[in-house]
Amino acid sequence: MYQTIVIGGGQAGLAAGYYLRKYGLSFVILEAGPEPVGSWPHYYDSLKLFSPAKYSSLPGFPFPGRGSRYPSRDEVISYLREYASRYHMPVKTNTRVEKVEKINGTFYVSTTDGEVLEAESVICATGSFHRPHIPDIPGIADFQGEVIHSSAYRNTAPYQGQRVIVVGSGNSAVQIGIELTEVSNTTLAVRTPVKLIPQVKFGRDLHFWLITTGLDKFPFPLFGRPVPEPTAVIDSAGFKRRLESGNPNQKPMFASMYEDGVIWSDGEREKVDSVIFATGFQPNLSFLSGLNALDGRGFPRHKIGVSNATTGLYFVGLSGQRSIASATLRGVGDDARYVVRRVIQT
Ligand code: FAD
């Protein structure tokens, strides 16, 4: 019997592990993948962090190298690998949780290979970006070209010479859209025009200002107001110039799709080869379905990471869990500390 079982071995699970170890609780981290590096290997090849290295660390271990640079996806993977080994994290890899039950005050955590582990409490750290969301567009099933979610996008290679529509106006949509213009004729289909925020202001990175003003880790909810969703795209590489020159161009979201392409809101039909939906994610917590811990949309019922429905059940790494930085490398440590303290008090 463990005091705590952590489900998910990404940055959120490792940050939870750091504080569980620090406060002397017995625990194990169950990770579906072969390594405790979260979803980072599945993100697109050219990804660079939006925060500089010095603002991208988990508790206890600063991100290596020059603080002002923007680390690559692969550097994050190496950092997480090293973090897990440095703190001797008790991670069981290749272990996917399929069901969590609570009977007479004890949690029973069942894995897909038939093992059942017991614990007094459970921390879910399975990420906010696991269930890709594609909106229900009329005619989408008739379209004969390629439809993917941005989570399946890796690089420009398959799109050489194509007509491509990227749906969305967030960070992923803009980054993917801009790199695709190198090889294809690309349009961003947007519900609201892209809003940009400069990466560097008055000679300092945006994160310096967020942290200095206290906005970054400001603990919401405040007077019942939820954590605001960041809507602006960080302009890390001349995005303003590229968008202003119409490469890629922006068009209001298309109304529907047909066999060969999209039908724009003014009725124009256009043949396209591929549509990439950068339209967000939802958490994947289906293993909790037996606990009444989720709402009708599959989102956890919780307050600042503490389940409202099931005593002893916690979350770390949810988007907007406690601050605008909750689901980031720089922010997840504070949330993990808060949650582990609540575990101890329960
Ligand atoms: P994940 O990394 O998703 O880790 C969850 C882990 O849980 C995974 O390893 C998964 O295998 C495991 N798991 C899931 N289900 C189960 C199960 N049933 N049983 C066992 N294990 C399970 N943040 C930044 O700070 N800077 C950035 O620049 C940045 N860029 C981003 C770019 C993209 C495209 C995206 C999508 C996100 C980005 N983020 C960034 C946000 C965030 O830091 C990452 O999404 C990060 O991967 C979240 O870490 P996590 O540990 O919460 O979840």
Image: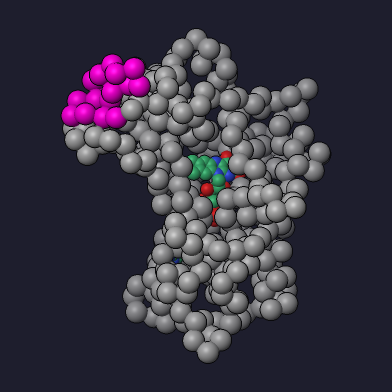
Q: Which residue is found at the position 51% from the left and 15% from the top? A: 242
Q: Which residue is found at the position 55% from the left and 20% from the top? A: 239
As for residue 68 lying within the magenta part, the answer is no
In what quadrant of the picture does the N terminus appear? bottom right
Task: Describe residue 30's horizontal placement relative to residue 51 as left or right.
Answer: left
**Nearest to the observer: residue 132 or residue 90:** 132
Q: Is residue 81 visible?
A: no
Q: Which residue is found at the position 76% from the left and 28% from the top? A: 204
Residue 266 image-quadrant placement: top left
Q: Position of residue 231 (x, y in %)?
A: 59, 34
Q: Which residue is found at the position 51% from the left and 26% from the top? A: 192
In what quadrant of the picture does the C terminus appear? bottom right
As for residue 272 lying within the magenta part, the answer is yes
Q: Is residue 115 visible?
A: yes
Q: Which residue reaches farthest top?
A: 245
**Residue stretch in magenta:** 256-273
